[in-house]
Image: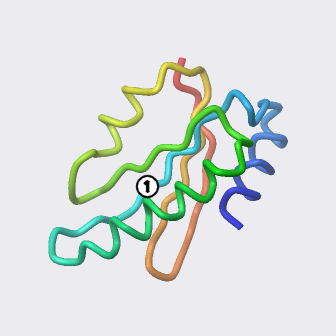
Amino acid sequence: MVGGRAGDICAQAGLASARATPVLVAHGSARHPALRLAAGTLAGKIAATADFADVRVAFLEEAPGVTEVLASIPRSAVWSACLWVRACTATTTSAD
């Protein structure tokens, strides 16, 4: 579902998904390591489709943080999705 939405957003923005790097932004929690594992599992599933150049995970409350992950992507377009326990929002961002 998230991977498909990422592809849709790329298409709407006129970006080739094969050149895009989705960044899944999860809350993260040292007290609940299952949250990190869930985000990593989802990223792995999206990466397995080979629809994107790369797939990354960033966290709000633990490393790697959003700024660190975005700074490490040497591509011109980044797609990000904020993953919450019960909600998901998506935006496109240019990282020129």
Total labels drawn: 1
- Identify the residue at the far left of this view: 31
- Residue 24 placed where, x, y %? 49, 53
**Residue at image location 78% in from the left, 36% down from the top:** 13
- Identify the residue at the far front of this view: 48
- Residue 57 placed where, x, y %? 42, 50
The quadrant of the image that shows the N terminus is bottom right
The quadrant of the image that shows the C terminus is top right
Q: Answer with left or right where residue 66 lies relative to residue 61.
A: right
Near-viewer residue (1 or 60): 1
Q: Answer with left or right where residue 67 lies relative to residue 89.
A: left
Q: Quadrant of residue 53?
A: top right
- Identify the residue at the far bottom of this view: 86
Q: For the residue labelled by badge 1, is the local secondary structure a helix, a strand or a loop?
A: strand
Q: Which residue is mark 1?
A: 25
Q: Residues within 10 Å of mark 1 (few under 14, many from 20)?
A: many
| Chosen colour scheme | rainbow
Q: Quadrant of residue 21?
A: top right
- Residue 68 placed where, x, y %? 30, 35
**Residue at image location 41% in from the left, 33% down from the top:** 70
Is residue 9 depicted above or below 77 in this figure? below
Is residue 75 depicted above or below 36 in this figure? above
Is residue 68 depicted above or below 73 in this figure? below
Q: Answer with left or right where residue 14 lies relative to residue 21.
A: right
Amino acid on which disc 1 is placed: Val
Near-viewer residue (55 or 76): 55
